[in-house]
Every structure is written in structure tokens, then in C-alpha cells.
Amino acid sequence: MGMVILDPDWKILSANQRAAEMTGYAVDELEGMSKLSLAGPEQREAMIRDLRKVSENGIPSYRAERRLLRKDLSPVWVRSCVSRLEADGEGHILVLSEDITAEVAAREKLAWQAAHDSLTGLASRGRVEETLQNAILRIDLEGPEVAVFCLDLDGFRLINDTLGNSAADELLQQVAARLRGGLDETDFAGRIGGDKFALIMLEADGTEGPLRRAERLLALFAAPFRVRGSEIAVSASVGISRYPVDGLDADTLLQGAGAAIRDARHAGHNHWSFCTPRLKDDACERLLLANRLRNAVENNEMYVEYQPQYELEGNRLVGFEALCRWRGPMLGEVTPSRFIPAAEESGLIVPIGQMVLREACRRAVTWQTGLVPVRVAVNVSAVQFERADFVESVLATVRDSGLNPRLLELELTESTLVRDRDEGAKKMEELRAFGIRIAIDDFGTGYSSLSYLQNMPVDTLKVDRAFTARLSTSATAVTMVRAIIAMARALGLRIVTEGVETEEQAEILRQLGSDEVQGYLYGYPESAQSAAERVWRELVPAAILTRQGRSLALLVGAVGKQSRESVTGVIMPHSVQ
Ligand code: C2E
Ligand code: CA
Ligand code: CA
């Protein structure tokens, strides 16, 4: 038992040999030292508080477990009994201590083992529950929320079966390491079962934070894992529950998040899902899409399809509209009506739009057979159009591609034009000066009146497919399209009607005098390859046939081993085939 006597200023008056051994100082070194200088820094305040009570007659004695620092700064844990020496009347204090370092170490190891998963070193299920419960206790119902994420590896059983247990364990350790590396300061992560991990996010207000967090969790799986020399691509599914909306206790929340994993799986691998479905509102989705879009552009997940446009009279292919497509490994095929708004909101429409323009021009160059010109139309978002360098960047792209600018048409919506009329008109004039055409897309859906078009430097007007859809059932629709066409004619604009799906619609449009048509009746958006084939199939023979006899034989030789029947076959109107 170590023993020291302190004077009223807590200086060591005397110490025994055992006290010297425990602290690593010689007895005469100890004598004269302040008791406080032995305490570990984190213990000092508590030691002062307790000693003060004893020296100021508050209490006669106390017991404490303290971490002291030895002379060589290594720690030593002691259990001490500190008491005032009543008898001597001088305010001396007696401290009796025993070394409990080994005991504390054993206790800590046990506690660590109970709180941690031995395989990964992450918190154990019990510890996750406890932490979650504590977090809940600290939060008033009105206060910030807590989000709970359950993360489950996709197809882990298969990995286990094919690679064996120990390789699978190694994989789990690597997953844990990535999780640990991806934690925010206030996050808490644990392994709560075989291949199930949990993450507690404190101060998760609303759904945005958790959603971003879920995305970041899934992103941890983007790169493959390397286990025993081979690369394994592993994805995960994440379920999210939130306190208090999804449950008021740790158990319910963990269960809720676990159940949401099933939903996430339903959507395919590498997805997340909220416990409460109502949380998947539009804003959330746009955010999610914007997040994924960022990678999509980098990973070349975007590509372009081409929808043919036909001259109504004579059924002749005149060009294609380039339409952007996105197919990603995580979400599959996402429609433009979903991702374009997200791309506009995040500004990603600028690189996406540039890619579409570059691709479209590059392809359009290959459609030029020297016989019939084939145009390409490219959609332009207001976000792109409003940029100061828009005209310059379009011109540079067209120049690089080698495409004759007269074969390029840019489609702008009415709403783009009304935003800043004068500035917009100026840009359009600049583009037109180079021969690039301007089309007003989705005409009739915006606010502009026809008279508004009068002073706009546009070449083409695209009648929105909403009108087309109603042509055969609504007299008003027919009247409106007739008015639009008459007005456009008067202004010298070319008219393209979109969304033509039936022969009946085509017939009405023929009577109304639409110049060109585009729609499923004539062709779905198709790959660049199919578009090129369409050009060859339809235009080359047609052009040559119209030049008559001599060239036809040449062509049959040149295009391939097509028989005369098939060459004439393909120039039949598409709708009749
Ligand atoms: P949009 O410019 O009006 O393009 C025509 C849309 O109508 C395309 O939808 C096309 O697939 C669809 N469509 C064509 N024929 C028919 C038909 O007969 N019936 C029906 N019901 N639909 C038909 P998509 O490809 O889903 O594109 C939707 C919109 O996304 C486009 O509408 C355009 O506003 C936007 N978009 C597409 N690609 C781009 C792009 O590269 N840049 C920009 N800024 N927007 C794009
Ligand atoms: Ca368009
Ligand atoms: Ca349109």
C-alpha cells in the first residue's frame, strides 16, 4: 500500500517506499512535490475538487480511482483513500493508494469487447442500440432529428459461398474500414449482424441531410474491393429511418431502417429507401438525381439518340432531333423529363448540353452523303442559352466537328426567349449569321402569343405534341393548330409538328399544312447507328432514283447487295410499310 502525507497546501510531506515504486520517483523526490503534479491532466480538476472538500472540512474522507502519471509519463491507475488527519490539528491529509492498473486494463478490455465487434472493430449491436437510445434521450421531441441507416451488402451470401468464410470476413473488414473512413465527426457506426452495418446520424434535420448521407454511403462502394488478390465489386442497399417520425425508441428505428432495405432492394441494387415513403418527394428526387448526374457525366453514362423528322409531303427524311439519354449502373434508364430539371438546377446541363451538341454535330457529318442534306436539331436549355459564352461555345463546337452550320438547328423553348428578349434576340442573330437555324420548341405550351414571334429571329416553329394528341378529338385543337400554322406561314417560318402517332393525325396535319412531322408514327428516337442506317436506306436510293436510271445501277452496286425490289421498297412512305 502506498502511503503519502500531504500538508495543507497538498505538498507531499512524506512518502513510503511503495508510493515511490508506484510512481517511479525516489522517496526524496516525492517529498516536496505537489500531489497535483502526479495526476493525469484529465484528472486534475476532480482531484482539486475532492481535496478541497477534505482540506476545508467539508468531508472527512473520500475514495477515488485516479489515473496518475509516473515519472516516465507512463500511466498508473490507483485506488486511493484520502482522509483528513483529525488528530494532528494541522490540516494534514493521509493518502493510501493501491495500484489497480492491471485491473483497470482487464475491465476496459471487457468493456471494449462488449461494445465492439471483434471482426471489424466497429461498435457492436448492443453499443449501437445504447448510443441510439442515449441520443434519443438527449433530444427533445422538437429538437433536431436522428437518422438511422442500415446498410446491407447485396449478394453477400453468394460471396461467402464462393470465396469462403475467411475471405468474406476480410471483405467485411474492408467494408468497415471504408465506413470508418467515410464517417462525419458526429456519426456513429457499428456492425449489427453478419453483413449488416448501422450508422447513426445525429442532428439530421429533414430529409435532405439523410439523403445526401445515404448517397455518400453508397458511393463508398463505387470502387471494387480487393480480397486475396482478386477484385470484387460489391454494392449495398441502405434503409433509413428517422427519429421521431419513424419511431420513438432504438429498437423500432433499427427495425424500420432494416425494413426499408427491402424497399431499396426492390428498386435494384445500390439503392437507398426511406422508412416512410412520403419522404420521397420531388425535391428529394431532384437532389438524388443531381448527385448521381455528377458521376454520370464523368462516367460517360450519357448518350444521344436521334428521332427522325420527315417532310410531310412526299414523306422524305429531312433530319433528326438529338435527344439526350442517361443509363446509369445505379438507376438504370432515367427519362429526360426527370433528369433534365435536375441537371438544370445543378448547372450540369451545361456540360451535358455540350456533349449532346458535340455528338450530334459529329454524327450529322456522317449522314451527309453528298446527295441530300440531313439536318440535326439540338435542344438548348435556358441555363445554357443565358451563359455569356453560349454563342462562342456553339460556334467552336460546330467548327470542330466540320459540320456545315446550315445543317444545325437549335431548339429553344418559349420560356427561354421571354426571360431576356433583347439579349436573347441578339444571340440568335449572331448564330443565324453563321447559318445556324433557330427553332421554337414546344410551341403553344408557354405564355407567348403568336404576335410575340413577329420580331423574333427564328426559322422554325415546333408545334407541341399536346396539340397533336388532341387533333382527332378536339375541334379547338384543330382550330388552334390551323391558326398557328397560318401565322407561322405569314412570318415565313417552317412548321414541324411533334408527337404524330397515328395516320389520322398525319392526315389532319397534311390538310392544315404542317411542313414537317416528327413522332412515333415515323420513327422512335434511335441509336446513332440506326439513324445512319436510316439515312442510307431511305435517302440514298431515293435521291438516286429521282435522278433516274443511270445512277440506280451504280447505287445497287454501291449500297450493298440489295435487289431492285428492296431499294424501291425502302422509298415507300414509312407509314405505309
Ligand atoms: P422535346 O424537345 O419536346 O423532345 C421530344 C420528346 O417527345 C422526346 O421525349 C421524344 O422521345 C418524345 N416523342 C417523340 N415522338 C413522340 C410521339 O409520337 N409521342 C409521344 N408521346 N412522345 C414523342 P424525351 O426524349 O423523353 O425528351 C423529353 C424532353 O427532354 C425533350 O422534349 C426536351 O425538352 C428534353 N431534352 C431531351 N434531350 C435534351 C437535351 O439534350 N438537352 C436539353 N436541354 N433538353 C433535352
Ligand atoms: Ca425538342
Ligand atoms: Ca418539343
Image (tube, rainbow, N blue to C red):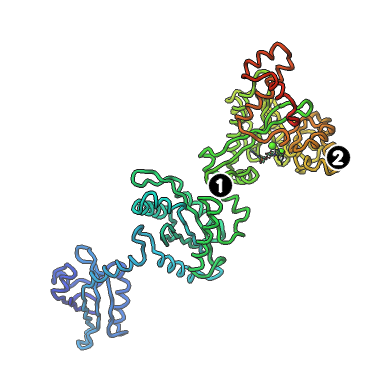
Q: Secondary structure at mark 2?
A: helix
Return the mark for residue 479.
2
Q: Quadrant of residue 277?
A: bottom right
Q: How many marks?
A: 2
Q: Residues within 10 Å of mark 2 (few under 14, many from 20)?
A: few
Residue 155 is left or right of residue 529, and the answer is left
Residue at 67 percent of width and 13 percent of height: 553
Return the mark for residue 322.
none
Please, what is the three-letter code of the amino acid marked with disc 2? Answer: Thr
Residue situated furthest bottom in the rendering: 87
Residues 175 and 139: in front is 175
| Residue at image mark 1 | 331
Residue at 36 percent of width and 57 percent of height: 120
Residues 27 and 81: in front is 81
Q: Is residue 392 visible?
A: no
Residues 164 and 515: in front is 164
Q: Is residue 34 visible?
A: yes
Please, what is the three-letter code of the amino acid marked with disc 1? Answer: Leu
Residues 446 and 48: in front is 446
| Percent coordinates x, y for residue 295 in the rendering | 52, 43
Residue 545 is left or right of residue 182, and the answer is right
